[in-house]
Image (cartoon, rainbow, N blue to C red):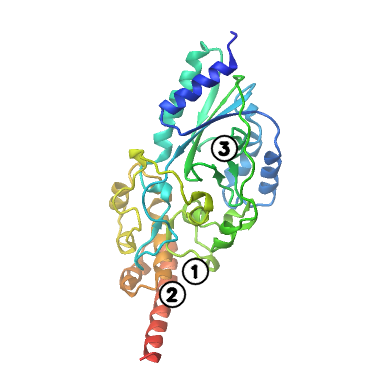
Amino acid sequence: MAYDPALITQKLQEKARALGFELFGVAAVQDVPELLRYREWIGAGYEAEMHYMARNAEKRTDPALVVNGAQSVIVCGKNYHTRAPLSTEPAPASAGWISRYAWGDDYHDVLKQRIRALYEYLVEITDGAVQGRYYVDTGPVLEKVWAQYAGLGWIGKNTCLINQHIGSYFFLAVIITDAKLTYSTPPPDRCGTCTRCIDACPTEAIIGPYVLDAAKCISYLTIELRDRIPESLRGKMGRHVFGCDICQDVCPWNRKAAVSLEPAFQPRPGNVNPDLGELLRMEQADFSERFRKSPVKRSKLRGLLRNALVAAGNSGHPGLLSQVEALQHHPDEMIQEHAKWAVEKLTTSTKAKKEDAYVHD
C-alpha cells in the first residue's frame, strides 16, 4: 500500500512530541563509517567482559538482520537532567554518588511504553503496510550511531551523544522499520579542540578522542563488572557507587542543559549523594525495597556493597571504619576482599591525618 513518506514522518514527529520525547529524527539504514569503527573497537577488546556486544556485533552493524528489509531507524530522545548537584561539586565525605540517570525510575520501563505507542501509531497510519521492532537500550542496535544520523546530536569525544540545545543528559529509544521515511541531516561535530572530558576522567578510560576502554570506565566497573574491581583502579574511582557522570558534568555543552520535569526521572529520596554508611548496612530486603523499579537494581546488592566499600575506602572518613570492618566477615569472598582493602585504605588515611595534625600543632 502506497503512503507519503514526508507526511508519515511529520505525523510521527508530532506523535513523538505528544508522547513526551523532546528529540526526534530518522536515519536511513546505510553503511556509515561508525559501523566499521565499532567492529574495530570490538576487535581491540575495548568491550571488556561485555561479551554480548561482540556476540551481537553483526546484528548491531546491520539493522537488516534485525528487521528484514530495514530502511529506516527512527530515534527519539528523552531528557533526564534534573535540578540537583553535579558529581564534580563538593559533597560530604560520607556521600557516595549514583549516576544522575539512575536517580528516578528505570528508564527502560518508562520509555518502552512510549516507543511502543509510537511504533503502534506507525503501523496504524500506514494501514499495517510496514513492520519493525522497537528498543530502549535492550536490543542489538547502535543507538548513538543512528541517533547521530537522525540529527539528534553528534558523538562527542567522551563517546556520549551531545545535542547542541539540551546537552547530553538524555535517553534514546529507537524503532527499526522497513518503512521508507524522510531522513534527517546529521549535525557537525562541535567538540572542537576541547578535551575536558578526556582530562577529567580519573581512570583514563577515554584513551583518545572518541575511544573508550570500557575496562577502565567507572560506569562499567560499578555496573557491568560482576567480579573484583582491579586494585589498580579502586583508588581512582572516588565516591562512585553506581555509574559515573564526570565526563558529562565537565562538558561545556551541559553548562546550560535543559531541565526535565518528567516525574519519573525526579530524584528519589536518598539517591542524590547517598550516605555510604546506609549503603554499607544494607540487607537484601532493604535493597529490594529501595531500588525497586530503579536502574540501580542492575548492580544487585552484591555489586552495590562492593562499590560502596571502594567509595568508603576512598572517603578518608573514619566514621565509616567500623561498618567497613564488619564486612570483612561477610559470607561473600569478594565482599570480604574489598572490605579488607577499604579497611587498610581508611586506616592509612586516618593515620596520615593524625600525623599531619600533630606536625601542624
Residue 345's disc is 2
Residue 8's disc is none
- Check disc 1 and report its element: helix, strand or loop: loop
Specify the amino acid type for callout 2.
Lys
- The label nearer to you, 1 versus 3, is 3
Q: Quadrant of the N terminus?
A: top right
Q: Position of residue 20 (x, y in %)?
A: 41, 31
Specify the amino acid type for callout 3.
Glu
Q: Position of residue 230 (x, y in %)?
A: 53, 64
Which residue has dot 1 on it? 235
Q: Position of residue 321 (x, y in %)?
A: 34, 73
- Check disc 2 and report its element: helix, strand or loop: helix
Q: Residues within 10 Å of mark 1 (few under 14, many from 20)?
A: some
- Check disc 3 and report its element: helix, strand or loop: helix
In the figure, 198 relative to 168: above or below? below
Q: Residues within 10 Å of mark 3 (few under 14, many from 20)?
A: many
Marks 3 and 2, the one that precedes in the sequence: 3
Specify the amino acid type for callout 1.
Gly
Could you tell me if the residues under marks 2 and 1 are in contact, i.e. CB atoms within 8 Å? yes
Q: Horizontal placement of 114 versus 151: left or right?
A: left
Q: Position of residue 183 (x, y in %)?
A: 62, 26
Marks 1 and 3, the one that precedes in the sequence: 3
Give 347 or 212, whichever is nearer the viewer. 212
Q: Residue at x 57, y 36 (%)?
A: 147
Give 311 or 180, whichever is nearer the viewer. 180
Q: Residue at x 40, y 87 (%)?
A: 355
Asked where in the image residue 312 lies, by quadrant, the reply is bottom left
Marks 2 and 1, the one that precedes in the sequence: 1
Q: Residues within 10 Å of mark 2 (few under 14, many from 20)?
A: some
Asked where in the image residue 358 lies, by quadrant, the reply is bottom left
Q: Residue at x 30, y 57 (%)?
A: 282
Could you tell me if the residues under marks 3 and 2 are in contact, i.e. CB atoms within 8 Å? no
